Image (tube, rainbow, N blue to C red):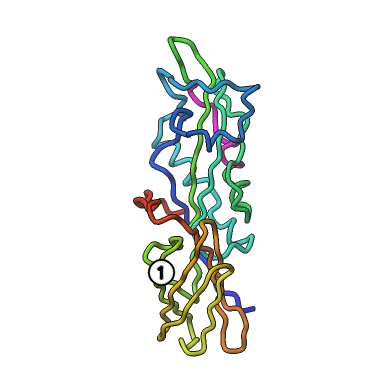
């Protein structure tokens, strides 16, 4: 298998997510018998120096190369990690909510555990513990091939998704393209139509004329109405 030099950077949400914004789907890692979510806080828990310093801390300490070292295919991977800031400002119960793998969840958990003491939340004049969540999106890009889609590394279920595939030193006529589920239809000159019926994740693999894999990219399959704006880019 030929291997190409990959690069990786990460994206951060513009702010932490509080308990009242998380929704039930992001509370699955919390044992309600041990922690009561405070829905309405007068003051949210905050990192010393505020949101700006929290972003700076993550930017300077997250090891964006981790997915590459673990062999992640090119793609966009969003990690969610939730944690509790207790009454003393200590960060506890740091737990990943997602399961992207390739060391990404472990890396975000590691850096959150290493953060300094926070300013705790308060409600009705009392200091209380609170639940927070941090999304981090790793973007793994491969040097050696390119798959161009309308939305980077995203397909939409139940519709035709046109893509353009380019590979270094491989002519379009000599390029083989396969997908882990669904259908991929060649229409000439490196152009293809991808059809996937179910949401989830798929992997697109590229092969040369000797049937050797030259690259792979992971795409998220969404419903069409799930399309949203782009997050703020912070390069690692």
Query: Is 157 or 144 nearer to us in this picture?
Result: 157
Q: Is residue 66 above or below residue 84?
A: below
User: Where are the magenta residues, as a range?
Assistant: 109-120
Q: Is residue 79 above or below residue 5?
A: above
Residue that lies at the very extreme toward the top in this rendered image? 125
- The residue positioned 61% from the left and 49% from the top of the image is 99
Q: Which residue is mark 1?
A: 160
Q: Which quadrant of the view contains residue 111?
A: top right
- The residue positioned 57% from the left and 78% from the top of the image is 214
Magenta stretch holds residue 92: no
Q: Which quadrant of the view contains residue 4?
A: bottom right
Q: What kind of element bears circle 1?
A: loop
Residue 30 pos. (x, y %): 61, 30
Residue 7 pos. (x, y %): 50, 64
Query: Is 233 or 75 nearer to us in this picture?
Result: 75
Q: Is residue 69 above or below residue 189?
A: above
Q: Is residue 28 above or below residue 44?
A: below
Using the rendered image of the protein, determine whether residue 52 is visible from the camera's viewpoint: yes
Q: How many marks?
A: 1
- The residue positioned 41% from the left and 83% from the top of the image is 187
Residue 226 pos. (x, y %): 40, 51
Residue 132 pos. (x, y %): 51, 31
Using the rendered image of the protein, determine whether residue 233 is visible from the camera's viewpoint: no
Asked if residue 145 lies left or right of residue 1, the reply is left
């Amino acid at each position: 298998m030929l291997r190409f030099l990959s690069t990786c950077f990460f994206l951060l949400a513009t702010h932490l997510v509080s308990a009242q914004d998380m929704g039930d789907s992001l509370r699955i890692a919390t044992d309600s018998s041990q922690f009561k979510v405070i829905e309405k806080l007068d003051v949210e828990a905050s990192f010393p120096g505020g949101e700006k310093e929290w972003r700076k801390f993550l930017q300077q300490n997250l090891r964006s190369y981790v997915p590459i070292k673990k062999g992640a295919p090119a793609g966009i991977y969003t990690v969610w990690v939730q944690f509790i800031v207790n009454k003393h400002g200590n960060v506890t119960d740091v737990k990943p909510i997602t399961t992207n793998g390739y060391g990404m969840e472990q890396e975000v958990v590691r850096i959150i555990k290493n953060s300094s003491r926070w300013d705790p939340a308060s409600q009705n004049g009392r200091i209380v513990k609170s639940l927070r969540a941090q999304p981090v999106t790793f973007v793994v890009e491969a040097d050696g091939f390119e798959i161009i889609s309308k939305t980077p590394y995203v397909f939409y279920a139940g519709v035709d998704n046109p893509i353009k595939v380019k590979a270094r030193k491989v002519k379009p006529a000599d390029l083989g393209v396969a997908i882990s589920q669904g259908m991929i239809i060649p229409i000439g000159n490196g152009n293809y139509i991808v059809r996937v019926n179910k949401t989830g994740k798929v992997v697109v693999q590229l092969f040369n004329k000797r049937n050797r894999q030259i690259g792979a990219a992971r795409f998220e399959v969404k419903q069409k109405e799930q399309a949203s704006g782009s997050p703020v880019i912070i390069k690692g």
